[in-house]
Image (spheres, helix red, strand yellow):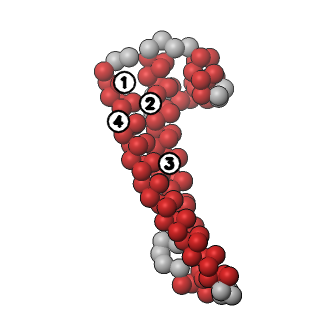
Amino acid sequence: MTDAAADQVMGALDELEQALEESSALHQEALSRVQRIRGRRRDGRPYSDIVRTEPRPRIVELVSRSLERLRSAGSRFRRTEAQALRSEGMKTEEIASLYGVTRQRVSRLTRPER
């Protein structure tokens, strides 16, 4: 693997780590909100009141933000790692087997980005 390829993988790994840490914080906040919503519902409050009074970002926004951040960072890491494996001479079939995807998917991952 070239130093440039290694640096790209490490950069993507750093981004993934940061996304996971951010996601963990968002998940903790969402879990806290889940408990508050349950408590308010047990107190007999209607969902319309619960949602209207929930602070922003609302629970659905927290979850969406977390999922999008993880998807983006995970995709970048998968792409750069697959490209690095390919540059080291690993066959498309081997990468596909490691990732649990088709050869066609690996071919798309290892193509240069436009």
Could you say which disc has been placed on residue 5 in the image? 1
Badge 1 element: helix
Distance, label 2 to label 3, CA atoms, is 15 Å
Residue at 43 percent of width and 42 percent of height: 16
- Residue pointed to by mark 2: 80
**Where does the N terminus fall, quadrant-wise?**
top left
**In the displayed structure, does residue 21 sit left or right of residue 38?**
left
Distance, label 2 to label 4, CA atoms, is 9 Å
Could you say which disc has been placed on residue 70 in the image? 3
Quarter of the view holding residue 15? top left
* Mark sitting earlier along the chain (2/3): 3
* Mark sitting earlier along the chain (1/3): 1
- On the image, the x and y values in percent for residue 93 come to 62, 17
* Mark sitting earlier along the chain (2/4): 4
The amino acid type found where label 4 is placed reads Gly
* Mark sitting earlier along the chain (2/1): 1
The amino acid type found where label 2 is placed reads Thr
Label 3, residues with CA under 10 Å away: few <14, some 14-19, many ≥20: many
Residue at 50 percent of width and 41 percent of height: 74
Badge 2 element: helix
**Numbered label tally:** 4
- Residue pointed to by mark 4: 11
- Which of 78 and 29 lies nearest the eye of the viewer? 29
- On the image, the x and y values in percent for residue 103 come to 64, 22
- On the image, the x and y values in percent for residue 83 come to 46, 24
- On the image, the x and y values in percent for residue 6 come to 35, 25
Labelled pair 2, 4 in contact (Cβ < 8 Å): yes
